[in-house]
Image: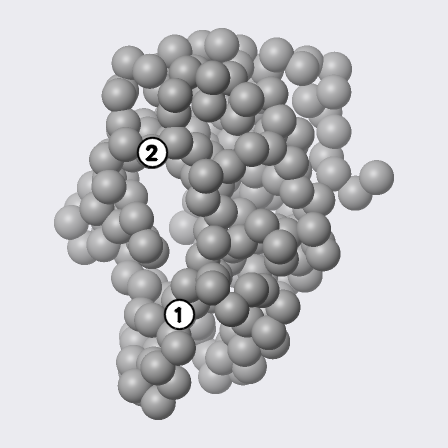
Amino acid sequence: MDNFDSNLAFLDKLPIVETFHSVQGEGTWMGANAFFIRLAGCDVGCSWCDTKISWNIKRHPSIAIADLVQQAITANPAIVVITGGEPLMHNLTELTKQLKEKGMRVHLETSGSHSFSGHFDWVTFSPKQFKHPHNSIYGEANELKVVVKEHSDLAWAEAQAAKVASTVIKYLQPEWETPSSKHLVMQYVLEHSDWRVSLQTHKLLGVR
């Protein structure tokens, strides 16, 4: 079994880095009122990751799913975004079930590096070369978002795009700390009309 399964002992809890109410900063739902649930734990190891604080699962508390659902209800967002870390390290079935029972629209942000679980209205699939995706993710994606740092990332993006449905919206996102990546992405999108540019607008706005 390739999923991290510490949650099996605590079916009513998940390890949480933080929860917060903001706007979705990236992709198709950019600008939407969003409540974020950031799960702890990641074994992908992106060198440019901006949430390395999430990697070590032992540094973060386990919080009852019922409490997470209540926080989301109180925020009253348009969408609830489950992110990480790598959220698919955990079984997300119970969390998403309870959120949807309360009428929430539930989104997932994942590298797809572990087998798929949960019930989602929207899945943002952001594959990483550091740990290749599990095959179960490709049929679940609604949007494909590939972070581009260097030219080789564009070939990776095309290889991943070939595995998802033709209806999936495809984004290239410049790596925030690499100025040259912006030119790479812009030029590629201008030459390949099936791709779009994704920006981390929350960083431009100075919000979480």
Please indicate, yes or no, whether residue 105 appears anywhere in the rendered image: yes
**Extreme-left residue of the structure:** 205
Give the residue at mark 2. 79
- Quadrant the C terminus occupies: top left
Please determine whether, in this image, residue 159 is positioned above or below residue 200: below
> Which disc is residue 172 wearing?
1
What secondary structure is found at the residue carrying circle 2?
strand
The answer to the question of whether label 2 and label 1 lie on touching residues, with beta carbons closer than 8 A, is no
How far apart are labels 2 and 1 at the CA level? 23 Å
Task: State left or right for residue 113 relative to residue 189.
Answer: right
**Crowd tier of the residue under label 2, counting other residues whose Cα lies within 10 Å: few below 14, some 14–19, many 20 or above:** many
Q: Which of pointers 2 and 1 lies earlier in the amino acid sequence? A: 2
Please indicate, yes or no, whether residue 181 appears anywhere in the rendered image: no
Q: Residue at x 32, y 54 (%)?
A: 28
Task: State left or right for residue 185 relative to residue 108.
Answer: left
Q: Residue at x 41, y 50 (%)?
A: 50
Task: State left or right for residue 21 relative to residue 116.
Answer: left
Q: Residue at x 35, y 89 (%)?
A: 191
* Type of amino acid at the residue the image marks with label 1: Leu
Residue 89 in the image, given as x and y percentages of width and height? 65, 38
Q: Residue at x 79, y 43 (%)?
A: 2
Residue 204 in the image, given as x and y percentages of width and height? 18, 55
Of 145 and 103, the residue lying toward us:
103
**Crowd tier of the residue under label 1, counting other residues whose Cα lies within 10 Å: few below 14, some 14–19, many 20 or above:** many
